[in-house]
Image (cartoon, rainbow, N blue to C red):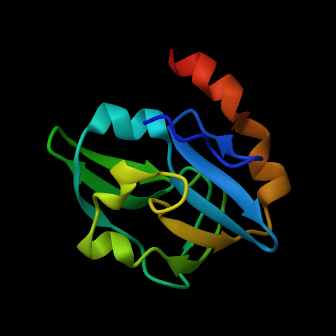
């Protein structure tokens, strides 16, 4: 998977990414995590308007190899979920950045919560 991430992506040590988009933040699973999981066969996403603190489990993903919990990289309220993934979870394998995002959140704590996140290049160095 050699698709480059968008400019400004921040990554967590638990392999989630976050991208600021105006007043919301798009969240997904990193390309590295998806490569480790293999073919994605199921995704369970949260309800709209549910709120999560940084580090809380907000979604579950299953692949042919394993099931994994996905942790919220920043605290916030779910304002959109990627409905396409419910019927086509393999979109995550195709492009984690464009088609494979999981949720969008509104966050009042981004400036504080983002302190533990890494630039994509630093993340890639840690995962090698």
Percent coordinates x, y for residue 79 in the rendering? 60, 81
Residue placed farthest to the left in the image?
A: 64
- From this view, report whether residue 97 is shown above or below residue 121: below
Residue placed farthest to the right in the image?
A: 111
Percent coordinates x, y for residue 38 in the rendering? 25, 38
Whether residue 108 sits left or right of residue 30 in the image: it is: right
Residue drawn 16% across the image and 38% down it = 65
Residue drawn 50% across the image and 61% down it = 101
Where residue 120 sits, quadrant-wise, is top right
Counting the numbered discs, the total is 0
Whether residue 113 sits left or right of residue 76 in the image: it is: right
- In this view of the protein, which residue sits in the foreground, 52 or 97? 97
- From this view, report whether residue 18 is shown above or below residue 10: below
Residue drawn 59% across the image and 47% down it = 17
Where residue 111 sits, quadrant-wise, is bottom right
Percent coordinates x, y for residue 103 in the rendering? 52, 69
- In this view of the protein, which residue sits in the foreground, 75 or 33? 33
Percent coordinates x, y for residue 112 in the rendering? 82, 51
Quarter of the figure with the N terminus: top left
Residue drawn 41% across the image and 37% down it = 33
């Amino acid at each position: 998977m050699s698709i480059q991430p968008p400019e400004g992506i921040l990554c967590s040590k638990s392999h989630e990414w976050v991208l600021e988009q105006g007043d919301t933040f798009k969240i997904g699973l990193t390309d590295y995590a998806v490569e480790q999981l293999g073919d994605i066969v199921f995704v369970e996403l949260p309800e709209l308007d549910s709120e999560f603190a940084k580090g809380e489990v907000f979604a579950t993903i299953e692949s042919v190899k394993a099931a994994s919990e996905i942790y919220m990289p920043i605290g916030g309220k779910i304002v959109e979920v990627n409905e396409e993934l419910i019927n086509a979870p393999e979109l995550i394998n195709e492009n984690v950045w464009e088609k494979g995002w999981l949720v969008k959140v509104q966050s009042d704590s981004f400036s504080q919560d983002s302190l533990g996140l890494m630039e994509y290049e630093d993340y890639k160095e840690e995962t090698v």
